[in-house]
DNA sequence: CTGTTAGCGCATTCAA
DNA sequence: TTGAATGCGCTAACAG
């Protein structure tokens, strides 16, 4: 019952022509008559032919596949980005292998190895929370496989990158909080190894300096931004005397959990403590009051990432096109940071 | 600069042995001496050998890859499930190609074709919102490629399935609302083509019957459960006179948006209108009041899905193992449905 | 425009 | 336990 797949041999034999002609007919090769091409396509369909990707990949020494490593699939930003990648990839005739590192360097290394063995034509990465070494990407670089980082990037002269201006975004959000009268702002953020967090912290600091607000080291909480840790930070905040007057979390989910815990203890948002997050997660609209946040276009970022890789793959071998692109963002002000006069 | 990959030929030549021996040494073949095996492994590593998956796949006529089609990546349930799949797959030596249908049959068909061409050893699917035909899965069935549906399934005698008891879950949640004194319950749900929605509706109805509450057809809203439509439904509800006394949405995000809109118009939750959702999305804990919902284990469901496929692939060719598995769930009662006495 | 020929890298028979 | 030989299905010179 398990009849073998039919190959171009079968259809060549059936038509009494050569396999090369069949192969050409199937791929829209320039040197082929419309008539035989049509004939080939028809009989191929009639016989239920399905091309064997492996044989083709093996022969052509390329896979038409782009590998993706992201920390997790389940943030709204990431799934937007992936959706954008998928769209652009299928429009460009590429497949995607999507993997998640689950925020650990260990899994990221494994994923990189798997994708390398699968001979992806290009690799797109957003780094895990705790990745320290870039060694697992060296094989790609050595082999001249285009490598692009997005969002959580690592500066590398051989790699392209797509980010937003995290420094500026954090600066804006901090300046906004200051404009609302906040002077003692807590910042909850992640591993400073990751550009997104270190740059936001830098922007946060600079906004203090520019507005003559003293920056206090003890106002910075480095966490993994899990719900549990967000709640813990809220509890630490509640123990402060005097209370800080604002919290800027580097992530909406973290901000939301913190907000909820603060409210549970009778804190009025934004009057006692103003709040802001990052990423414009759907949750930012659903909590009350609505969460001030930074929006940036995940879908477009994903599309652009693929586009850059495809362009690079279409270049001549020895002409490299490394570029860093910074996309725009938008400060979305909601009730959580708007103090009544 | 683009040095070619090293192959088993290179390492065979280097060691003055045959490629077959190298191939065997690399794969832990029984007929090989420990000594030469060790030698091969060492020099392979030293020379930086990477096996070529394509050649191997081509030769073995299998890919060690499982294809996945899900509606979207970005629900918390789905990413849990995918994380579970990834874990079990890598533990079992399988790769995953993950695709999303973005809730459209059209994309689902495309994805199925791509995965088929990529010769996945097995396929795991959660159906798109509007998929009507199963024709695009026939090639897999014809070719005896194991096919499993999960969560959003389609009954098919050749396919395995993993679900929860959606009927029972909806029954429980409805009975709970009734126990809180609700008698006029609106149900917001999705395309009844999908088992998850039709079965929940059935449970919803049965709970009415069993508690002698009249079921009203006009209380059922079929939507795509987007934020926009959820808000629209809330507005329709607000126009009712008398108001319904509860809303059961088939999805937490939908419930949350509905809740917010109701609150915006001065409705007290749960006293004027009680609310319940489905899936235990993180948002269900963050809205106020907390959302009563149904929890089921996405991660475990994903692990199980892969495990079933791997088992099936390890069976003898002509012995099929089709099974339907129903996992447990849990009713999580939060403030949104708890009426003060 | 079409056919001939020769591999891509690996796994597996068969023989030694 | 090892080696020689073959072919998985396809593509791309090269030669008509």
Image (spheres, coloured by chain):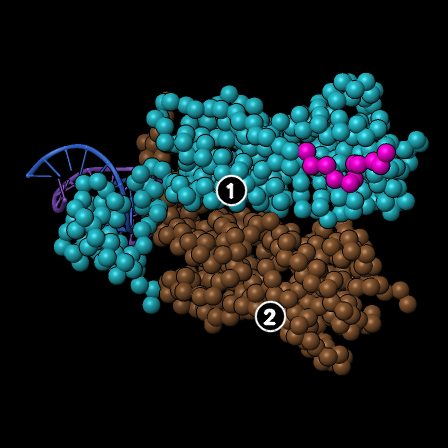
Chain colours: A cyan, B brown, C purple, D blue
Q: Residue A50: tell me if it is visible.
A: yes
Q: Pick whichever, A315 or B308, lies toward us.
A: A315
Residue behind mark 1: A84
Question: Where B62 sits versus A117, above or below?
Answer: below
Mark 2 in CB contact with mark 1 (< 8 angstroms): no
Task: Give the x, y percent position of residue B153.
Answer: 54, 65
The boundaries of the magenta stretch are A331-341
Question: Where A309 sits versus B164, above or below?
Answer: above
Q: Count neighbours of disc 1 (C-alpha within 10 A) and say few if under 14, some if 14 to 19, many if 20 or more.
A: many
Q: Secondary structure at mark 1?
A: helix
Mark linked to residue B198: 2
Q: Pick whichever, B277 or B233, lies toward us.
A: B233
What residue lies at 72% left-to-right and 36% top-to-bottom? A333
B199 within the magenta span:
no
What residue lies at 62% left-to-right and 27% top-to-bottom? A165
What residue lies at 71% left-to-right and 40% top-to-bottom? A252
What residue lies at 78% left-to-right and 56% top-to-bottom? B265
Q: Secondary structure at mark 2?
A: helix
Measure the C-alpha gap from mark 2 to mark 1: 31 Å
**What is the total number of numbered labels drawn onto the structure image?**
2
Task: Give the x, y percent position of residue A36.
Answer: 17, 51
Q: Quadrant of the N terminus of chain B?
A: top left
Q: Pick whichever, A103 or D8, lies toward us.
A: A103
């Amino acid at each position: 019952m398990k009849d073998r797949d039919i190959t171009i041999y079968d259809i060549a034999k059936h038509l009494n022509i050569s396999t090369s002609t069949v192969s050409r007919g199937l791929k829209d090769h320039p040197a082929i008559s419309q008539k035989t091409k049509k004939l080939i396509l028809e009989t191929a369909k009639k016989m239920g032919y399905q091309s064997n990707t492996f044989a083709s990949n093996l022969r052509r020494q390329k896979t038409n596949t782009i590998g993706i490593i992201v920390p997790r699939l389940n943030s709204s930003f990431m799934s937007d980005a992936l959706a954008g990648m998928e769209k652009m990839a299928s429009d460009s005739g590429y497949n995607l292998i999507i993997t998640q590192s689950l925020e650990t360097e260990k899994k990221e290394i494994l994923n990189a190895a798997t994708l390398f063995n699968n001979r992806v034509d290009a690799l797109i990465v957003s780094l895990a929370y705790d990745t320290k070494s870039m060694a697992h990407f060296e094989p790609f670089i050595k082999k001249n496989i285009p490598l692009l980082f997005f969002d959580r990037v690592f500066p590398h002269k051989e790699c392209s990158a797509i980010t937003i201006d995290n420094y500026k975004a954090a600066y804006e959000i901090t300046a906004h909080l200051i404009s609302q009268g906040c002077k003692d702002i807590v910042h909850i953020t992640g591993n400073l190894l990751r550009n997104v967090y270190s740059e936001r912290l830098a922007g946060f600091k600079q906004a203090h300096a520019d507005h003559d607000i003293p920056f206090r080291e003890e106002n910075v909480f480095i966490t993994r931004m899990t719900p549990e840790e967000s709640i813990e930070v809220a509890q630490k905040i509640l123990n402060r005397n005097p209370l800080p007057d604002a919290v800027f979390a580097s992530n909406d989910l973290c901000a939301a959990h913190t907000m909820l815990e603060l409210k549970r203890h009778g804190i009025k948002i934004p009057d006692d403590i103003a709040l802001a997050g990052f990423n414009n997660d759907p949750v930012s609209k659903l909590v009350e009051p609505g969460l001030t946040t930074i929006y940036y276009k995940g879908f477009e970022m994903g599309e652009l990432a693929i586009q850059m890789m495809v362009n690079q793959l279409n270049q001549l071998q020895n002409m490299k096109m490394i570029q860093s692109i910074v996309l725009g963002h938008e400060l979305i002000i909601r009730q959580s940071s708007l103090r009544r006069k």
